[in-house]
Image (cartoon, coloured by chain):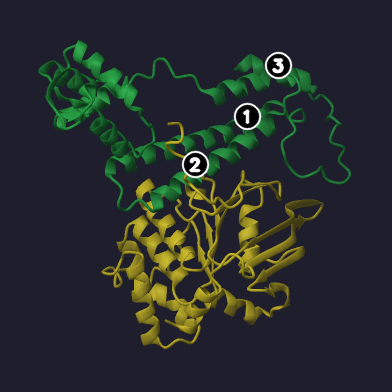
Amino acid sequence: MTAAAEDVRRTGTPESAPVLAVRDLTRVHSSGQTAVHALRGLTLSVAAGELVAVMGPSGSGKSTLLSLAGGLDTATSGEVLVEGEPLSRKSRSQLAALRRRSVGYVFQDFNLLPALTAVENVALPRELDGVSARAARQEALDALRDVGLPELGDRFPDAMSGGQQQRVAIARALVGPRRLLLADEPTGALDTDTGEFVLRLIRRRCDEGAAGLLVTHEARHAAWADRVVFLRDGLMVDDTGRVSSVDSLLGSDT
Amino acid sequence: MSIRYGLLALLQRQPMYGYQLRGEFEASTGGTWPLNVGQVYTTLSRLERDGAVAATGHSESDDPELQKTYAITERGCAELADWFGTPVSRSRPPRDELAIKLAMAIVSHGVDVAAVIQGQRTATLRSLQDYTRLKNRSDEVELSWLLVLDSLIFNAEAEVRWLDHCEARIVRFAPQGASLPGPPAQKGAAPLDSPPGARPPESATSSVRGRS
């Protein structure tokens, strides 16, 4: 186990400092006279080992939140802290390193590089991060095995099904010591069974100590989270809270 | 009705006594619909009266009623085959408290429909989380229960989608009349000011009523 993975385990309790914290986050997209408030002072935190799902209608600010959390976009005001460090104080190269090293993204579009095989796609962020090609390949093979594709490493994306490509994309998001997992409609147009497999992977990674933020409009997928928050017009309007027990649910009316 | 056929289906596998049937029914459905043993015996005696099952032997129990072992008859097998061969009818939908509640909320005065929707959505999502958690630790669970669990999950999801839909529809019908839970109005925009030509809330409500 790598030192970073040890870190993940050591901090893997909800009580420890959150892996992701956003405070009073506001994002205004301005073009000429019109200003669109994508987020209006949102505060939210995700602890290690916790998976939080974000639901809300189109335009409620879900995807903006995810972009800001991953340092892909800059807040108009407010703060994003990843592992206690404010992103606003990081240089561009530090942000890039953070995105490669600590943050895993799963998007609806798989964004696999068509000229690279599955294993090369997965190994790429690690190689960019200075890991030797051999070690990166081994990590990538391990990650592909974790997503149930141990034998497809040498395939090119266009020779794989949509579900397989999405699993490769997830392997790429999970490879190495990622502590924050950001997923935007990760099941896309996958059939229900494959979609559930993808959610199980994300759930498992969080159970192993990562923090996860999942944007989805499907209640069935949000239900894999520990907590579901609802956004509307850039603000949180409801929160299911952490659910503790399932004992009261079934067979209670005997 | 489903208890009757459930018991027949279990008896088709092998003859059983009442307690056993109750246990098997609950194992197959994960205890989602608990049976009390009284229901089992009432149903068994009706089945026996109708000639669908016959009391054949005796179990070890001291209680004469509990001693009976039941077996399915040819008539019972035919009835069961008929059940499997006939789609469940949706022609008379079961009463749905939530649908009735929302329909009434729309036509009642002083009810914050949006708050009803949001409150229900959160509650339904919590149940959905619970079902999903059960499913996530269900590797050792019987396939039959897993399918029942999936049914609960799909139904809860459908309910959430329907609530989303209701909310969007209410907003469309009553642009400024329905107060959805949301951010306070932006600075400078007085929430109660209607744009020229907008319908007052009252007529917006009645137009919803008129369409439904």
Image check: B170 left or right of A51?
right
What SS does tag 3 mark? helix
In the picture, which chain is green?
Answer: B
Amino acid tagged 1: Arg
The residue labelled by disc 1 is B169
Amino acid tagged 3: Ser
Gap between marks 2 and 1, in whole Å?
A: 34 Å
Q: List x then y, in percent, for residue A122.
A: 41, 73
Kindly check if marks 3 and 1 are in contact, taking CB atoms under 8 A apart as contact: no
The residue labelled by disc 3 is B206
- Measuring 49% from the left and 84% from the top, which residue is drawn there? A3
Q: Is residue A117 visible?
A: no
Q: Chain of mark 1?
A: B
Q: Nearer the viewer, residue A86 or A185?
A: A86
- 2 or 3: mark nearer the eye: 2
In the picture, which chain is yellow?
Answer: A
The residue labelled by disc 2 is A248
Above/below status of B197 relative to A149: above
Image check: A233 left or right of A172?
right
- Measuring 49% from the left and 77% from the top, which residue is drawn there? A177
Q: Chain of mark 3?
A: B
Q: List x then y, in percent, for residue A6.
A: 49, 79
Local packing at callout 2 (Cα closer than 10 Å; few below 14, some 14-19, many 20+) is few
Kindly check if marks 2 and 3 are in contact, taking CB atoms under 8 A apart as contact: no
- Quadrant into which the N terminus of chain B falls: top left
